[in-house]
Image (cartoon, rainbow, N blue to C red):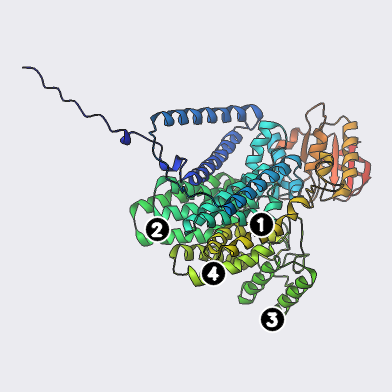
Amino acid sequence: MQAAHHTLPPRPASTRPILRPYWGVGENWRTTLLLTATLGGLLVTLMTELLGAFRLLAHGPVVAVWSSVFVGLLAWFVRSRRHATAQPSVRDRTPFTLTELLLLGYLAVVVTFTAMLAWVAPPNTWDSQTYHMSRVMHWVQNRSVDFYPTAILRQLHSNPWAEYLILHLQLLTGTDRLANFVQWASMVGSLVGSSAVAKELGADRRGQILAAVACATIPMGILQSTSTQTDYVVAFWLVCLAFFSMRLAKRPDLPSALGVGGALGLAILTKGTAYVFALPFVALLAMTTFRRRERKLLVFFGLACTIAFVSNAAHYARNLDLYGSPLGPGAEGAGLEYNNQRIDTAVIASNLLRNAGLHMGTREPLSRAAERSINALHALLGISSNDPDTTWPGTSFQVQRPSMNEDNAGNPVHLALIGIALLIYAFRFRRNSTVTAYVAAVVVGFLIFCTYLKWQPWHSRLHLPLFVLWTPLIGLALSSLSRAWAGNMAAIVMISSSAPTFVFSQTKPATGSASIFTLPRDDQYFSKRPDLLPVYNEAARRIKALNCADVGLMTDMEGWEYPLWVLLKDNASTPVRIKHVAVGNASQRKSTDLESFEPCALFLSNREQAPSISVAGKPYVLTWSSGGIGIYAPR
């Protein structure tokens, strides 16, 4: 008997393995970009910690690892495309209006012009010189991100993710040309993310574009997007967190869980303010998870929390080892605590008023009027606007005047638009649970910020993530107006009011005698302290004249360290090592590796200069001094 042959029907093409929707290029392209960035951020963290554990953070190993990553991604992409089936892309086919095209064109101009500024100008903010870039140079020198002795403790305990990426760029290129692009890329990502969040809130295409325009015109954001500050980086991760939290609550799946966990972990690893601003979003997601009691959602929420913790575990461990706390010392020194020394209703109201006042600076009469009003309200509250328990030492409250400085610029137009958007929300969207939850999360984040942190005159910089998180609501509110011209006028006001920040930045001016396009690059490192330029140049010249390759650094917590690295490495015939010596703080425990380091010169900054000093039993004599800088040579 002939055996029967059973032939299975061919597998329908539509059931073949295909690229998941998250990795498509149709309507989910923004989701793809945000998730790819988040997974890439986790990869940077993993590579940094693993290579650093074996002291392999050097050009060769980093190039090898990144090459392997790119080869693997290319192979995955080719294989995925080979097995993917053509599917119709679901997207809005409605032609763009002229207004939408003009606004998109403006966004392209912002992205292009800020990229040019980021490339031409070097890292030159105050924090870049003290710890952002300095810690990167120590990591390169040590081939590890382990803690080391330093007089500037922020180089150790401050959350390091933004500098991790700068470290990789530095090792790959051998230059700091790409250092500013970490913040720039975060700005571009935030433009995409704000529009994606606006869509989740229910905004139409015009509203999504207006959200991106609102994000692109934040004065503080424009100024920071070409610097090595970290507030735009944490803003981007918080936008990703908000977006993926809403996606996970609506449709629990693995990509959304990875997005929530990765974004939360990276936000925390970037800056401490992420704890404050992320808490309400995480709390809302937790309440949703435990209220619905869906097993799948519970598992994914647990996975997200695990990813967030694990991504910070190594930095927690280093802080715990040195300070006894995973969060670091909680202060910059004696009497320099970050948190309010007391908390009550008057304190919270005071900080709400003073933090808002940082963004009320416009014309002088209006600024003075706002300042008088806030002080009058403090009198009614029975608390001083300069209460030492709630005010950073050595500072006093005033309404911030218009500024082109990325440390203290205000956002008055956007503050007004937030107020308008909240009014529109109250009348039109308060019954929308998704919008209400989002508004509540951002408002509560600001309340926690004001409750916990002492007021500082540079808090406007720390507010950048809040302003970015408000832009989706601004886009939603403006697009909901029955008269389209009102939203268009708001866009024009935002664009025109922010335009000067592109040209007249204090640290990156595009015109004038100090223009970044004409001023020598080395001179631009001193844009914040031009008085130090001749002093540092002469100090570097004298150290080079000693044929010295091992330089001991003695400074205070605000010492400008990074320019010394730049000037000594320029045209250096032998590799230069710079290490902090005679450290008197907690990091002196990490001085064991200095036993083989014998400086042939000492660079003293902001320290008392005696005719001679002794370091590790070796005497040094002062050979030159100027402007608070001293050079010592062995006796």
For label 3, count other residues whose C-alpha is less than 10 Å away and answer few (under 14), some (14-19) or many (20+): few
User: Residue 545, labelled with which disc?
Assistant: none
Vertical position of residue 528 compared to residue 374: above or below: above
Q: Which badge, 1 or 3, comes first in the chain's sequence?
A: 1
- Judge left or right: residue 85 versus residue 148: left
Helix, strand or loop for disc 1: loop
Residue at the disc numbered 2: 289
Q: Report the amino acid beneath label 2.
A: Thr
Instruction: Please tell me which residue lies in front, 475 or 549.
Output: 475
Front: mark 2 or 1: 1
State which mark lies toward you, 4 or 3. Answer: 4
Q: Which mark identifies residue 382?
A: 3
Helix, strand or loop at mark 4: helix
User: Can residue 224 be seen from the camera position used here?
Assistant: yes
Residue 464 lies in what quarter of the image? bottom right
Quadrant (top left, top right, bottom left, bottom right) of the N terminus: top left
- Closer-to-camera residue (67/561): 67
**Dot 1 amino acid type:** Ile
Label 2 Cα neighbours within 10 Å, binned few <14 / some 14-19 / many ≥20? many
Determine which of the numbered discs, if any, sits on residue 218 in the image: 1
